[in-house]
Image (tube, helix red, strand yellow):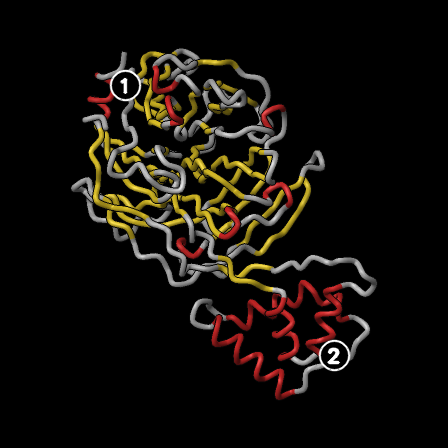
Amino acid sequence: MSELATLLTAYLRPDASRTVLRPFVIEDPATGFPRTQRVVARVLALDQAQLAKELQIVAAGLDDRHRDTEHLLLTRFEQLKGFAEGRPPLSRDQQKLIGAYFSEEFSFESAALFNPSVVRHPDQSGAEAGSERIVVSLRGIGEGHISSLAFRTGLWGADGQVTLDDPSAYAVGPRIERSQGTNGELIVHLLNDGAQEISETVVYPFMPSQGRGIEDLRMVQFLDDDGAVDYRGTYTAFDGSDVRQGLLRTADFKTFEMRGVQGSHYSGKGMALFPRKIDGRFMMLARQDNENIWLVASDDYYTWNGGEIILQPKWPWEFIQLGNCGSPIEIDEGWLVLTHGVGVARNYCIGACLLDKHDPSKVLGRLSEPLMAPRPDSRDGYVPNVVYSCGAILRDRTLLMPYGVADNFAAFATVKVDELLAAMA
């Protein structure tokens, strides 16, 4: 561990008790009458006493873990009601029980909670002078090694410490609406309107391209040319064999726009958006060759092609590959970039470099030794020998850097910018 990083006492660990109610899609062996209709027919064959008994079981299992279970189950029934067409009108109890049979609890962070990024909270009311409220995005891993996006809130205090808010007892999955862009591309709107606070928002996989996970959101607060501010992030969608780069955008962490990257960078992972345009163009860091850090420019936020390599592995702790650890951070001296390097025995370390403010293809300096490396007392976990971050923020020449430990849990550190720059070669 470099002496440049000061470890904080705050941690975020996985909690198997946090579950979200999501659609349960059953497989159909295709033996005539569709299986969904067969299940519905069995429910409708229950008499009123049996129906009431089953609903009591549902309530006992779900009501203490989910807000307004009845609404959730009826909403799920509405998604299936085509299978009840041609039958007499169903009672409310029948609708609820059918919804229950086609729902499941998903413990979205039961195995791990890691690879965080951090931004300033959109609502700073109540923060004392010198403090800032923060939002942390995380990758949760649940049943079947499936990754979802989760969020936490907290306070970066004037004393430099981080105090994390207790997460809500509830978690809410998105209501999904789809539309098409001008070129026919899919635009997905995620409406977590049932969430009453940010920690309740969960974005779990819901499309085939995300079948195995939505991973490693690199969030940044983005300033547009017209002065408008929102939060944007890149993520990796994984279907079990192929990866695809995606873009997520929100103003409040309840309603999101989600799109796939268009252009040659649609496949791959590890893109990170600069927090503003440079010379009228959007800029990204990328790692499409799985080895080097690339700089990519675009006139269109959603379309990314080409680019140039600006950083290649140089030091032993990054001989295998280099990548970013989140969006570049603007300081007086240029663009400060946290990096990750993979070295011997697949150890992941965190480094840093400085890019020219006006021409970020120019590298002004980089660390020759890791800023952070796996520690002997915290190197074991879901994937051992890993420290990794998806983004930091700056306040008064100090970085707040959340980071994942062994693909297991998340911790926090602060770094003095002046000391970091002085250590660069």
Q: Which mark identifies residue 369?
A: 1
| Residue type of the residue flagged with mark 1 | Glu
Q: Nearer the viewer, residue 375 or 209?
A: 375
Instruction: Residue 370: name its quadrant.
Output: top left
- Quadrant into which the C terminus falls: top left
Identity of the residue drawn at 36% across and 24% down: 337
Q: Nearer the viewer, mark 2 or mark 1?
A: 1
Task: Read off the residue under disc 2.
Answer: 89
Residue 308 location (% of width, % of height): 51, 13
Q: Residues within 10 Å of mark 1 (few under 14, many from 20)?
A: many
Dot 1: what SS? loop
Q: Residues within 10 Å of mark 2 (few under 14, many from 20)?
A: few
Dot 2: what SS? loop
Q: Nearer the viewer, residue 290 or 255?
A: 290
Q: Nearer the viewer, residue 267 or 47?
A: 47
Identity of the residue drawn at 52% across and 78% down: 57
Left or right position of 16 against 73: left
Give the CA distance from mark 2 to mark 1.
Answer: 70 Å
Residue 95 location (% of width, % of height): 65, 74
Residue 136 location (% of width, % of height): 36, 44
Q: Which mark identifies residue 208?
A: none
Asked if 140 appears above or below 290 in the picture, the reply is: below
Instruction: Residue 415: name its quadrant.
Output: top left
Identity of the residue drawn at 62% across and 69% down: 101
| Residue type of the residue flagged with mark 2 | Pro
Left or right position of 130 against 367: left
Left or right position of 34 against 385: right
